[in-house]
Image (spheres, rainbow, N blue to C red):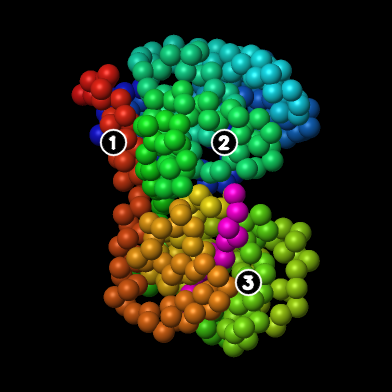
Amino acid sequence: MIKGKDIIVVGIQAWDIEIGSNCKNIAREFAKNNRVLYVNPPMDRSTMGKEKHKEKIQKRIRIKKGEEDDLVEIAPNLWNLYPKNMVESINWIGSHAIFKMLNKRNSRLFSTDIKSAASRLDFKNVILFNDSSMFLGLHLKEFLQPKVYAYYMRDYLVKVPYWQKHGERMEPEVVKKADVILTNSEFFEEMCSHINDHSYMVGQGCDVSLFSDVDGSIKVPEEFNNIPQPVIGYVGSLTTLRLDIDLIEYIANQRKDWSVVLVGPEDDDFKKSNLHNLNNVYFLGRKEASELPNYVKGFDVATNPQLTNNLTIGNYPRKIDEYLAMGKPILATQTKAMNMFNDYVYLASSKEEYITLAEKGLKENSKELAENRMEFAKSHTWENNVKTIYNSITKATKHRIEWA
């Protein structure tokens, strides 16, 4: 356990982001025993120009003018910083040398804002926790001089077009510079360990309390009244970057007596897909996060029909923990990141295996198996995740730092 320290958290998501954020959950957990400064990404010139009409950007402009505070206390021991300095939008630049030069300038401006806030809070000997900010993060160690620099990798961002152009060369530099690398999958741990010996898989946290149905209070929505069982279901964004449309269609065609239920917003490819022409495929649309447990309860088998590609191979899908928390039989694509679920999830490597394992999940489900799944999900709390992060930081730096 690390206690009584000053921790600065930087990343690629602002505190006021609308979606869930690993980094925010980790920061809240840090703040239970330490002082934490959560730093929003700086405003860049391109975003300010394109989204100037949005309140979030207007707020940044007011802060830059000094009309609102840049440093806000959002909870005991937890502050949020809105950087005043605007950085240049440089990702379009083709020359890597020029990009790196301008990126260092951006990082220096960003660091100036961070040092100002840290000084006002009287932060000393800080632990710098960087959640995937590979560009600005390249120079933060030299500009901020933290006691420990931890880099957190939880997605294969360098395979995403925005990050790929310069990230494939820059992220390895960040990994090399960091004192400790923290990852949420074995895939990323193995990848980083070739560059930095202090690379550790720390798993993933998840708040599964919303999906706890111990008292039976979660009710299946009425929409299921007209959907024949068994139900093979998925909740989440329906995007062809991550999900296998052909696989879903194969399952529906091979077992016409099964209902395939998809809950979530669709991208254009899903909207145009042949799935909409199949009588046993049901699109239930976007739902509020608070409603999702009700829909999962209506599944006989919960599934995550991922494609295996650069975006998903190392991905830790949080929905697996949510499915487990409800005790459901789960069917997912076999990837290295999914190995840790091997004892609790049916992992398929082919379309044919999806059918075989779905049948197995339907046939052998029991109260005992459901309870085992729920207990395993409970072990993946943010508290346990952060304890593992603390242990990894201590292990990586104990040869030069005395941890009280």
Query: Mark 3, mark 2: which one is toward the viewer?
Result: 3
First in sequence: mark 1 or mark 2? 2
Q: Is residue 69 visible?
A: no
Depth check: give the residue in front, 26 or 395. Answer: 395
Residue at label 3?
248
Magenta-colored span: 300-310
Residue 35 appears left or right of 80: left
- The kind of residue tagged 3 is Ile
Please state the horizontal and vertical placement of residue 182, each as a whole percent of the image.
41, 37
Q: Give the structural element (helix, strand or loop) at label 3.
A: helix
Q: Residue at image x 53%, y 44%?
A: 155
* Residue in front for this viewpoint, 250 or 298: 250
Residue sitting at x 53%, y 26%: 173
Q: Quadrant of the C terminus?
A: top left
**Residue type, label 1:** Asn
Q: Does 164 sit above or below residue 149?
A: below
Q: Residue furthest left?
A: 404
C-beta proximity under 8 Å, tags 3 and 2: no
Where residue 6 sits in the image (x, y, percent)? 36, 22
The answer to whether residue 397 is above or below residue 193 is above
User: Residue 253's image quarter?
Assistant: bottom right
Few, some or many residues within 10 Å of mark 3 (<14, 14–19, 20+): many
In whole angstroms, how far apart are the C-alphas of marks 3 and 2? 32 Å
Q: Nearer the viewer, mark 1 or mark 2?
A: 1
The quarter of the picture where residue 391 lies is: top left
Residue 275 in view (yes/no) = yes
Query: Label 2: which residue?
Result: 13
Are discs 1 and 2 less than 8 Å apart at CB?
no
Q: Is residue 160 magenta?
A: no
Q: Quadrant of the N terminus?
A: top left
The picture places residue 345, in percent across and down from the top left corner, at 41, 67
Q: Which residue is mark 1?
A: 391
